[in-house]
Amino acid sequence: MPRPLRVLQVVSSSATSGAEHHTVVLARMLARHGHFVEVVCPPIPWMLESLRDAGITTHPLDMRKAMGLSAQRELFAVVRGGRFDVIHTHLSRATYLGAVVGAALRVPVISSVHVETKEPIYKWMARGRNRLVAVSNYIHGVLKGQGARADAIDVVYNGTDFGDIHVETEEEVHAEFGIPLERKLVGLVGRVAPEKGHQVALRALPAVLERDPNLQLLFIGRTDGDFHDQLREEAQVLGVGDHLTFTGNRNDIPRLFDAMVFSILPSVMESFGLAVIECMARGRPVVASNVGALTELVIHEETGLLVEPTPASLAAAMHFLLANPDMCLNMGRNARIVIQEKFTVAQMVERLEAVYYKTAGVCG
């Protein structure tokens, strides 16, 4: 067996989105596998506490200073003192900083590309022993199209452990939000922002309610700017305000998925779609836009439905699943099987370990 590796994870965002949670889960799993892991991240309590609870050394660093000499010196000291085999960066600021320090200390850098981006750093750093990790074939194509060497890019899908979580509270979810028990719940999980398709979902709702008035639409996620208020106002104009619930940011997403009939994600574009595989892991189908990486996650008419990101197309698909409960259940069962075969956290970590060993040139 290859020896354990010394891995430094560097993430630059201070949000609570996919890349940040991915970094925490990955660091914890690598440590469980016997690797020596440290993490450089912004000084945000939830991330530091989660990592420290797992016994992982953290180095708080304000990534907004990533282009300054101060931040570079701090990371330089961490890397030099840690004798790391690889530096694994997440998001652009971390990659700029990691690339400079890695080159200076001759430590190879692996950069995970979680979102579609035009930042030139990815093309520049994909040379020598450095590598890029694309979270989907879609992102692989984007990077290649921007001039990154194809042989320096590995595709490693994100994974979920939602299939391992046990919950049983459908009635409690209805009660918590004051939703009549007879209403069927359908949810859109993701940051409440225009690109996630919340307006498309809202405008599809009247047509769905016309055929099935016992439906409640949940918007689950943190809000951005004034968009939340705009949606509420439009819901009142459309006459569907009583059938729309904003839950805010939640830490019990598996519980909410279990209370749903299915979920939707009518995004304008998605580089991966973590909420899709999380829903599928709970045995629920997904109605998603046929854009970006979503076409890699949802198998049309087997694990869900792929639609055009328009209100009419979304409404038709939602009505189909509501009107055909047996097919909906079967798609959900198929979805769970697909997750177990391709999208678990264990599989993600195993594939990333292979990239680490290849990059570090370490063998048993």
Image (cartoon, rainbow, N blue to C red):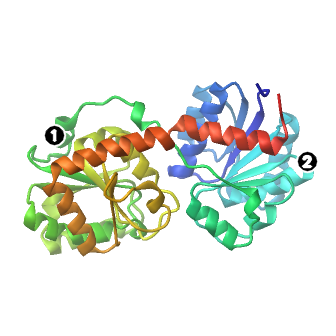
State the residue in front, 182 or 81: 182
Label 2 secondary element: helix
Residue in view at x 21 percent, y 40 percent: 173
Q: Distance between the residues labelled 2 and 1?
A: 57 Å
Label 1 secondary element: helix
Depicted 7 relative to depicted 179: above or below: above
- 143 sits to left or right of 149: left
Q: Classify residue 27 by image quadrant.
A: top right
Amino acid type of the residue that numbered disc 1 sits on in the rendered structure: Ala
Residue 232 shows up from this direction:
no
Quick one: quadrant of the N terminus? top right
State the residue in front, 61 or 146: 146
Q: Classify residue 321 by image quadrant.
A: bottom left
Amino acid type of the residue that numbered disc 2 sits on in the rendered structure: Leu
Residue 20 shows up from this direction:
yes
- 287 sits to left or right of 234: right
Residue in view at x 88 percent, y 40 percent: 80
Residue in view at x 15 percent, y 59 percent: 243
State the residue in front, 56 or 206: 206
Depicted 5 relative to depicted 348: above or below: above
Q: Sequence order check: which comes first, mark 2 or mark 1?
A: 2
Task: Name the spot of residue 189 as percent of width and height, x first.
Answer: 36, 53
The residue that mark 2 highlights is: 105
Q: Closer to us: mark 2 or mark 1?
A: 2
Task: Name the spot of residue 216 as percent of width and height, x first.
Answer: 17, 55
Task: Name the spot of residue 140 as percent of width and height, x first.
Answer: 63, 62
Residue in view at x 23 percent, y 45 percent: 329
The residue that mark 1 highlights is: 175
Quick one: quadrant of the C terminus? top right
